[in-house]
């Protein structure tokens, strides 16, 4: 784990790209933006989408988010599969589920879509179900604008540098966040060691539960050792001794970030003004 070094309020002499930041592919503008800009731009639309009840508004924001993500980020085949297949299929399934759960006594009965015996599926129930599913899909896809192109380290640095979040909180949270991949590595090592020693025998659910219980103690011991090393590293760098620290890597907030936020807010306002979901 890397901890920012140096105490005081000085400015780094040379600006360098953070080593754990994603590369900036040519033509992919989202990687060049400040992480806070990618959070602030869709945030008003995400909050407002909670209150809308029509189909058109969340569908419009879903398309807008897809446009920004597909043009501004370099996506792997797995992420493209999620965006183009998993998200639409989830919207269809969730919309159908909410349609079936809608209380028929509280909706209009003008349009009958399906009737099986005494059970009836009304058009209003479908509208409620799919408007809810589209809202969830639109909020999720808007969150991917920053989520797919931002690392946790850069987001932490931008919060400390621009939002003036105390570095004690920011870098402590970053250290805790980096425990997750470390746990995954430790678990793989423990599984391999158990297989080599013949401790992973047996088949079926009982044997699987027994194997997982056997991972707990060595995984906990490895986590304690890693926590001690991180604590010693932070203590050696006088972490928390001074109210401010010199930043080794800067994440600046540029004019392009302001332009992106303004354009996204303008597009969001235009969608709400044209579709008028609260009218």
Image (cartoon, grey):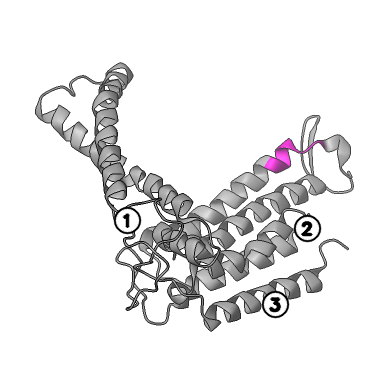
Return the residue at label 2. Answer: 54
In whole angstroms, how far apart are the C-alphas of marks 3 and 2?
A: 21 Å
- Of callouts 3 and 1, the N-terminal one: 1
Specify whether residue 239 is in view: yes
Write the residue at 29% across / 23% down: 208
Residue drawn 87% across and 35% down?
105
The alpha-carbon separation of the residues under discs 3 and 1 comes to 39 Å
User: Is residue 112 in view?
Assistant: no
Residue designated by label 3: 266
Magenta span includes 101: yes
Secondary structure under badge 1?
A: loop
Where residue 94 is drawn, which disc sits there?
none
Give how far across and how far down residue 230 sits, in percent.
29, 45
Element on which disc 3 rests: helix
* Residues in magenta, as a range: 98-103
Query: Circle 3: is it few (<14), some (14-19), or many (20+) Cα within 10 Å?
Result: few
Q: Is residue 96 magenta?
A: no
**Residue 66 lies in quadrant:** bottom right
């Amino acid at each position: 784990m890397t901890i920012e070094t140096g105490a005081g309020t000085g400015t780094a002499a040379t600006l360098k790209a953070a080593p754990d930041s994603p590369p900036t592919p040519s033509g992919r503008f989202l990687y060049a933006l400040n992480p806070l800009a990618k959070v602030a731009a869709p945030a008003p639309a995400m909050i407002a989408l909670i209150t809308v009840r029509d189909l058109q508004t969340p569908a419009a924001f879903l398309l807008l988010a897809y446009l920004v993500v597909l043009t501004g980020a370099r996506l792997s085949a797995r992420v493209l599969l999620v965006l183009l297949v998993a998200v639409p299929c989830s919207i269809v399934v969730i919309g159908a589920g909410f349609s079936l759960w809608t209380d028929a006594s509280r909706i209009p009965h003008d349009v009958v879509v399906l009737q099986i015996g005494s059970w009836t599926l009304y058009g209003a129930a479908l509208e409620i179900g799919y408007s809810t599913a589209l809202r969830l899909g639109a909020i999720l896809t808007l969150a991917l604008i920053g989520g797919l192109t931002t690392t946790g380290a850069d987001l932490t640095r931008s919060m400390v540098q621009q939002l003036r979040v105390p570095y004690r909180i920011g870098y402590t949270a970053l250290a805790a966040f980096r425990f997750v991949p470390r746990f995954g590595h430790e678990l793989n090592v423990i599984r391999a060691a158990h297989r080599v020693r013949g401790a992973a025998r047996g088949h079926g659910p009982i044997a699987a539960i027994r194997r997982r219980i056997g991972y707990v103690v060595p995984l906990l011991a490895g986590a304690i050792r890693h926590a001690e090393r991180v604590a010693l590293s932070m203590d050696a760098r006088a972490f928390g001794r001074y109210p401010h620290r010199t930043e080794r890597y800067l994440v600046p907030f540029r004019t392009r970030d302001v332009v992106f936020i303004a354009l996204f807010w303008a597009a969001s306002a235009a969608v709400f003004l044209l579709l008028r979901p609260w009218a």
